[in-house]
Amino acid sequence: MYKNEYLIYGKMSKILVTGGAGFIGSNLVDRLVKDGHNVVVLDNLLRGNKIPTQTLSKIKFIEEDVRNYEAVKMLPKVVTLFSILQLF
């Protein structure tokens, strides 16, 4: 991943990662934070939280299910969305 991949108009992006506390999502979140992005994670923690403690303090974490429409419509506006799905 290159640092400039998620630049929008020369600024760091505000990025929403759904499922960001799982194995794949947490690694993505960690990388995005290291690249200087403003990251919001939405996860119901069904499979636990794998986000490193030092990264967790640098993000906005919302413990909620993505299927809850009321919670999703209250999310902050973001520029980019990553959705990590666990199918089983």
Image (spheres, rainbow, N blue to C red):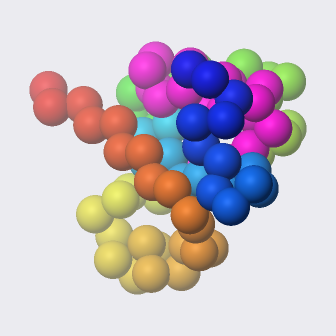
Q: Quadrant of the N terminus?
A: top right
Highlighted range, magenta: 22-42
* Vertical side of 47 occupied by 85: above or below: below
Task: Tell me where residue 28 appears, x and y as whole percent.
Answer: 55, 26
Name the residue nearer the viewer: 37 or 9. 9
Q: Quadrant of residue 36?
A: top right
Task: Tell me where residue 59 appears, x and y as whole percent.
Answer: 76, 45
Name the residue nearer the viewer: 46 or 62. 62
* Vertical side of 63 occupied by 87: above or below: above
- Whether residue 21 is visible to the viewer of this picture, yes or no, is no
Task: Tell me where residue 4 appears, x and y as whole percent.
Answer: 67, 35
The residue at the point 38 percent across, 57 percent down is: 65
**Residue most extreme to the front:** 9
Task: Tell me where residue 34 appears, x and y as whole percent.
Answer: 78, 26
Q: Is residue 53 left or right of residue 50?
A: right
The residue at the point 28 percent across, 63 percent down is: 67
Task: Give the number of callouts.
Answer: 0
- Whether residue 46 is visible to the viewer of this picture, yes or no, is yes
Q: Quadrant of the C terminus?
A: top left
* Vertical side of 33 occupied by 74: above or below: below
Q: Is residue 56 left or right of residue 80?
A: right
Name the residue nearer the viewer: 52 or 17. 17
Name the residue nearer the viewer: 31 or 6. 6
68 in the magenta segment: no
Q: Quadrant of residue 68?
A: bottom left
